[in-house]
Structure formats: structure tokens, C-alpha cells
Image (spheres, rainbow, N blue to C red):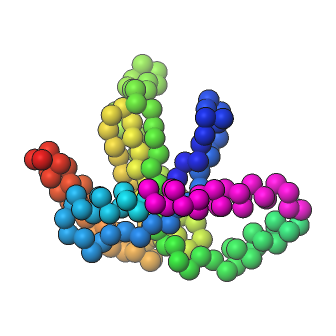
Amino acid sequence: MSVRTELHRGQLGNHVTAMFAELPVGVADPLERLEVLAHQMIGLKGSGQSVGIESMLAAADFVPATLMTLGAKVSVFAGQRVVNTVTTNIPGPQHPLYLLGHRMLELFPYIPLAQTVRISIGILSYDGHLTIGVTGDYDAVPDIDVLCAAIESSLAELVGTVTTV
């Protein structure tokens, strides 16, 4: 989630933090699923969780390098047992980009895998369109095509519901 404020306007660099949401996979209706997730994200954003995580990361500037190195090694060794999928949206430019006079037609995100994350999903907007890039660890998820097909059908179902309302 972006934690960029007006003070960061025009500055380069990322100002993001993690938010941990539970996906409403048991909700059949696409609009209700979207509503449940939106309500949950609003609650998480207002909970102060993002400020707490951002503060912990900012504290790294004051911790001696040897302690940071030790902490990083422990983190890599211990791993993360809860998170095995990460999803992020990336706002891209909403105007066409060109290279040597040729218009870029599509732009696809790639989110690398790290530690125990076995699936990453990037959602990128570019020039009025959304693209989704899914990266998976084949050893852990050899049938990732099933997930990709489900994402496509769920989005089509949601769009179909919205356009008929």
C-alpha cells in the first residue's frame, strides 16, 4: 500500500508498506467479493498498521549495521511461514509511451519471488488499460495456469456484472 503523503509529491522512490488482507474466496457473488475486500482494505488502511510497519522500517536508519545484518540473516533463515503470495498494483503512466517513434502498446508487470513467496501477482495500469503479470515457482505451483484462468474468468464475471447494473 502506498504511504506517500503530500510531502513526498514529486519525489522519486517508493513509499510503500505491506498490508495483510484475507481474500474472500468463499463469497460467490463478484460484487459482494469486491465489497468485502474493499471494506477490509479501508479498515486496514485506517488501523494504523501501515504507519507501524513504516516506522519499523524507518528505525533501520538508527540501528547499527551489524545488528541490521544479523537481523537480515535471521529473517532469511527463519523465513516467512504465513505469506506465500504477494499481490501489488502499480500505477503506470496514463498516456502512451514511445521509443524511437514506436508506440508501446502494452506493459506487463513482473514481481520477482523472494524467500517463501511462491506466487506474485502484479497489476499494472498503462494508458487506460490494466495488465496482470503472474510469476510462480514451478516446483511449488506447477498448475499456476489454473490460477491465471481463474483470475481472467473472475474479472470477466465482475466486469459483466458491473456493465449490466
From the viewer's perspective, tell me whether residue 131 is left or right of residue 165.
right
- Observer able to see residue 148: no
At 63% across and 77% down in the image, what residue appears?
79
Q: Which corner quadrant of the image does residue 67 belong to?
A: bottom right
From the viewer's perspective, tell me whether residue 156 is left or right of residue 91.
left
Question: Residue 3 location, x and y as percent?
Answer: 58, 48
Count the marks: 0
Q: Residue furthest top?
A: 101
From the viewer's perspective, tell me whether residue 93 is left or right of residue 148.
right
Q: Main secondary structure of the magenta part?
A: helix
At 54% across and 61% down in the image, what residue appears?
47
Which stretch appears magenta?
Answer: 42-64
Q: Which corner quadrant of the image does residue 39 belong to?
A: bottom left
Closer to the camera in the image, 1 or 120? 1
Closer to the camera in the image, 107 or 20? 20
Question: Residue 43 location, x and y as percent?
Answer: 46, 60
Question: Residue 18 location, x and y as percent?
Answer: 56, 60
- Observer able to see residue 28: yes
Question: Residue 102 location, x and y as percent?
Answer: 39, 23
At 51% across and 56% down in the image, what residue appears?
45
Q: Residue furthest left?
A: 164
Q: Is residue 35 magenta?
A: no
Q: State whether residue 100 is above or below residue 1.
A: above
Q: Is residue 58 magenta?
A: yes
Closer to the camera in the image, 105 or 67? 67
